Image (spheres, rainbow, N blue to C red):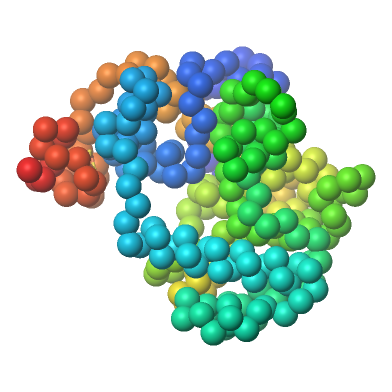
């Protein structure tokens, strides 16, 4: 795999990361920043500086449909994990894709140790935490850790039980996607899954990260090895620190993104909020 270039990282970054702000990164936030820093400011960073996002998140039909599909495959995975078939009402649901369902069933039969919808946070000392539904460390009774980055995968399959005294060496991490199949970036979300899972399970040597496109019979898969972990950490840390610095400075001019050089309709920002917007 081609290794990306990094910016200079702070000294001792491998043991503890100095953080400018208590802003936990996610893949989606890093992507928004990369596409348009001003949109990132309006929808996310403003929340960390002023307490409220200038443009709060609102769901739409596509996100609601995506959530319903995820819930369906999650229920199916619970049934398969318990040794049952996929329930008939799920199989009859128009959102269910029988081909994807069969592939899921076959994978879960080969890798019986499954974790369904796991949230993982990495703190400034690179310690990995399982997170609860509030995105807080499940093992901590009070207080919060400053999280460097958080990630959630839909299904993890392991060659040995990933809890207790067992030590998995091979994992498959699956993320369900709605919409048209698209090839993942080499150093994108799948690479992030590999990084957080190798921090979470120190014996994992090989991680296969997969996008499964629920509306099509398509998947994309990338394999990562533990020997790449240091590069993965450095790569994502450089991205996170750049965004943390942007938030810390908390001032920016709207920046035109490469897709729309002069006029932009790409997000919900109005003309008052972004001088490039065409929305009144
Ligand atoms: S309208 Fe375009 S340029 Fe303005 S914030 Fe949204 S994405 Fe960025």
Q: Ligand 1, what quadrant?
A: top left
User: Front-most of 199 and 121?
Assistant: 121
Rendering coords of residue 240 (x, y %)? 49, 30
Q: Is residue 80 above or below residue 27?
A: below
Rendering coords of residue 252 (x, y %)? 25, 23
Side (left or right) of 159 relative to 128: right
Side (left or right) of 89 relative to 240: right
Q: Quadrant of the C terminus?
A: top left
Q: Residue at x 65, y 39 (%)?
A: 131
Side (left or right) of 76 relative to 243: right
Q: Residue at x 52, y 49 (%)?
A: 189
Q: Is residue 276 above or below residue 70?
A: above
What is the number of callouts on the image?
0
Q: Is residue 76 visible?
A: yes
User: Front-most of 258 and 29?
Assistant: 29
Rendering coords of residue 94 (x, y %)? 46, 81
User: Front-most of 141 and 33?
Assistant: 141
Q: Residue at x 44, y 23 (%)?
A: 244
Rendering coords of residue 243 (x, y %)? 42, 28
- Which corner quadrant of the image does residue 38 belong to? top left
Q: Residue at x 49, y 16 (%)?
A: 20
User: Front-most of 104 and 57?
Assistant: 57
**Which residue ends up furthest to the right in the rendered image?**
165
Q: Is residue 228 visible?
A: no
- Which corner quadrant of the image does residue 9 belong to? top right
């Amino acid at each position: 795999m081609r290794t990306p270039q990094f910016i200079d990282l702070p000294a001792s970054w491998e043991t503890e990361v100095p953080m400018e702000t208590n802003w936990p990164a996610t893949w989606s936030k890093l992507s928004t920043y990369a596409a348009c820093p001003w949109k990132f400011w309006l929808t996310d960073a403003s929340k960390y500086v002023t307490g409220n996002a200038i443009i709060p998140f609102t769901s739409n039909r596509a996100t609601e449909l995506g959530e319903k599909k995820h819930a369906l495959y999650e229920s199916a995975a619970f049934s398969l994990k318990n040794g049952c078939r996929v329930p008939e009402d799920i199989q009859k649901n128009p959102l269910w894709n029988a081909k994807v369902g069969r592939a899921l069933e076959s994978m879960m039969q080969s890798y019986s140790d499954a974790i369904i919808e796991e949230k993982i946070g990495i703190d400034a000392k690179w310690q990995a935490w399982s997170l609860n539904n509030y995105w807080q460390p499940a093992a901590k009774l009070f207080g919060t850790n400053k999280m460097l980055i958080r990630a959630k995968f839909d299904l993890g399959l392991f060659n040995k039980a990933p809890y207790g005294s067992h030590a998995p060496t091979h994992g498959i991490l699956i993320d369900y996607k709605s919409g048209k199949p698209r090839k993942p970036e080499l150093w994108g979300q799948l690479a992030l899954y590999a990084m957080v899972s190798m921090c979470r399970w120190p014996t994992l040597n090989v991680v296969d990260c997969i996008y499964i496109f629920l509306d099509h019979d398509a998947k994309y898969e990338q394999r990562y090895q533990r020997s790449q972990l240091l590069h993965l950490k450095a790569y994502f840390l450089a991205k996170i620190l750049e965004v943390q610095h942007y938030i810390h400075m908390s001032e920016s001019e709207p920046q035109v993104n490469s897709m729309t050089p002069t006029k932009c309709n790409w997000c919900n920002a109005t003309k008052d909020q972004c001088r490039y917007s065409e929305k009144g």
